[in-house]
Amino acid sequence: MKSNSKVIKLTGNSYAVLALLEQFGESTSYDIKQAIELSIQNFWPVPHTTAYEEPARLAAAGYLSVRQEEEGRRRRFYSLTEKGHEALAAWAADPEVAPPQLREEAILKVFAGGPPGPLADARRAWHEAKREELSAMLREVGESGDSSLTASERTLLTGVGYHQKMLELMDLLMEERDPT
């Protein structure tokens, strides 16, 4: 039997959409956008358009199914197909990962000659607020009473730790070297 789906290259953003649909179930593009903002945006920034363009691309390739409302706004609801589940599981199990990227404008500005103190102070405040936001989310997720860590708890713990380390880095950035 010949498939009508086209062959596409799956990207990190493709797998992000597949993972969100696996976690949250059938969703509209707007639902996917909201889920991105509340979850993976904290560790995997994606362009706003990903929630609208990527599901259609994945559906055309057979990784997602689409159900459209008959009336009203005629929204499209996306869900994983068996092919989508299999691709996500294979990707998630593959131990090969791309090197991490650090894009920190405050550090770039210091490199360009900017004053470390005010830059680090501003960035410290942001990292403190983000650490507290993720800690609150972690407390909320952890109220399930389950003794084993969920995927959400693991990623939130990573986020809290990341922002704690970035706070330490900002302190390092402001240290003055002893000229002796």
Image (cartoon, helix red, strand yellow):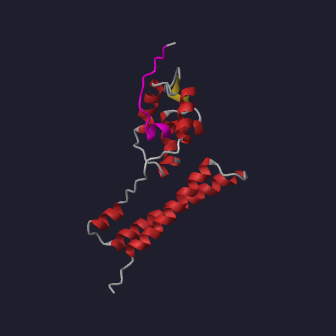
The residue drawn where x is 28% and y is 69% is: 114
Examine the rendering and report whether any part of residue 81 can be seen: no
Region of the chain picked out in magenta, as a range: 2-16
In this rendered view, identify the residue nearer to me: 130 or 90: 90
The residue drawn where x is 49% and y is 62% is: 163
Left/right of residue 97 with respect to residue 21 in the rendered view: left
Which image quadrant is residue 48 in? top left
Relative to residue 152, is residue 106 depicted above or below?
below
**Residue 97 image point, x, y percent:** 47, 46
Left/right of residue 60 with respect to residue 138 in the rendered view: left
**Residue 72 image point, x, y percent:** 51, 24
- Answer whether residue 112 is magenta in the image: no
Examine the rendering and report whether any part of residue 29 can be seen: yes
**Residue 27 image point, x, y percent:** 54, 33
Relative to residue 51, is residue 171 depicted above or below?
below
**Residue 39 image point, x, y percent:** 53, 48
Q: Quadrant of the C terminus?
A: bottom left
Relative to residue 106, is residue 10 depicted above or below?
above
The residue drawn where x is 30% and y is 72% is: 115
